[in-house]
Amino acid sequence: MRQSELFTKTQKFAPKDEVSKNAQLLIRAGFVHKEMAGVYAFLPLGWRVMNKIMTIIREEMNALGAQELYLTALQRKELWERTDRWDDAKVDVWFKTALKNGTELGLGFTHEEAMTAMVKPFVTSHRSLPFSAYQFQTKFRNETRAKSGIMRSREFIMKDLYSFSRDAAEHEKFYEKAQAAYERIFRRVGIGAQTYTTFASGGTFSKYSHEYQTVCDAGEDIIYVHEGKGIAVNEEVYTDEVLADLGLSRDELVQKKAAEVGNVFSLGTKFSDAYDLTYTDEQGEKRAVVMGSYGIGPARVMGVVTELFADERGLVWPHSIAPFTVHLINIGRDDDAAQLYADLTSAGVEVLWDDRDERPGVKFADADLIGCPYRVVVSDKAAAAGGVEVKQRTDETPVTRAPKDLVAYIKNSRTQT
């Protein structure tokens, strides 16, 4: 893409009322637009990152055999009354509205109720099970305070997966596969080393649920980490009984601040019972379906990546989710830049070409702010040295490479990263 055709522009300053690092940088770099507190629009660069995160998640969900669908954001009151989650005293984050005829509706903050009711006509005998279904859906949560940028917003996209099994043993097999898929997702988006499988409260469903907590100064949770085993315990369940259950002692654990990027829950039959979601087993007995719920917030992942890796110059994107792999800058030598842009693009390398009529300093500063993994400079100086100047975003010193060797250099460097 030519940067001259990108309608968004970088900014020197973020809005004065924006306190979170992730939103400040993403706004300045032209990735998001702040509509109001806790509500953000994703601009072309930001939407490219979001789509790459969602593609990684989608690939891992599909590999589990899960089927993608799309439910509605508008929710019927009676669906939620069955599970006692319509009352504001029970759930205080509802956005509610009404049709012109007075019928009350809610804007879904999650979709367990809707999914359970939707699948009921399709589940009859044991032959109907097991299966799992997921969606990328906009959720609405009336947060009292929204001060963490895109990490905690009032309108956001959530990937929520729901599993339907015949019994607890079958559910547990899928649950473990889902956990492994989540670990792969966080590795692939670049935060695997900082993300811990964290034991948390299972609520009314089970003794424990599992969160995926990324160690991050901007996080809102406190976890206790066993770095050797790569697991953690959420502060909310941090007791001697838990350290016993996990075979840990308190002196092995280190307190850290963290941000939750995903969670998996065993739901048991709570929702199945509420909607009479049952099947007939091989002996003709009626049994309740055992369910699980598995969530990831792609924007929350994007915000955490920003918080973790950004430096004093701007954003730093992992290769897998960067908006473009190469930020191409030409200082003069328009024809050479155009040829290199064509060559890289035809080789499958995603390129943002800064073809604007701007001073070199402005172009370099914008490249650092936007944060693509590689900056490639075409100039008389680089040509005299035998090629083009290449610098990885996290390196201080550029190297010179012949244009014909550039694709191989990028691919090899990426493999080693």
Image (cartoon, grey):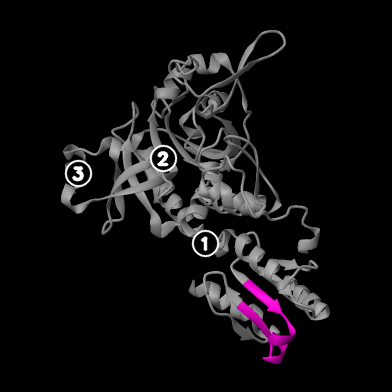
Tell me if 61 is positioned left or right of 240 in this view. Answer: right
Cβ–Cβ under 8 Å for marks 2 and 3: no
Bounds of the magenta segment:
375-390
Q: CA distance from mark 2 to mark 3?
A: 20 Å
In the rendered image, residue 410, in percent from the top left (x then y), is placed at: 60, 76
Is residue 343 located in the magenta-colored stretch of the structure?
no
Tell me if 155 is positioned left or right of 11 in this view. Answer: left
Q: CA distance from mark 2 to mark 1?
A: 35 Å
In the rendered image, residue 366, in percent from the top left (x then y), is placed at: 66, 63
Residue type for callout 2: Val
In the rendered image, residue 145, in percent from the top left (x then y), is placed at: 49, 31
Residue at mark 2: 264
Residue at mark 3: 243
Task: Judge the density around disc 2: few (<14), some (14-19), many (≥20) Cα neighbours within 10 Å.
Answer: many
Residue type for callout 1: Glu
Q: Nearer the viewer, mark 2 or mark 1?
A: 1
Q: CA distance from mark 1 to mark 3?
A: 39 Å
Of the pair 149 and 106, the residue shown nearer to us: 149
Residue at mark 1: 312
Task: Judge the density around disc 3: few (<14), some (14-19), many (≥20) Cα neighbours within 10 Å.
Answer: some
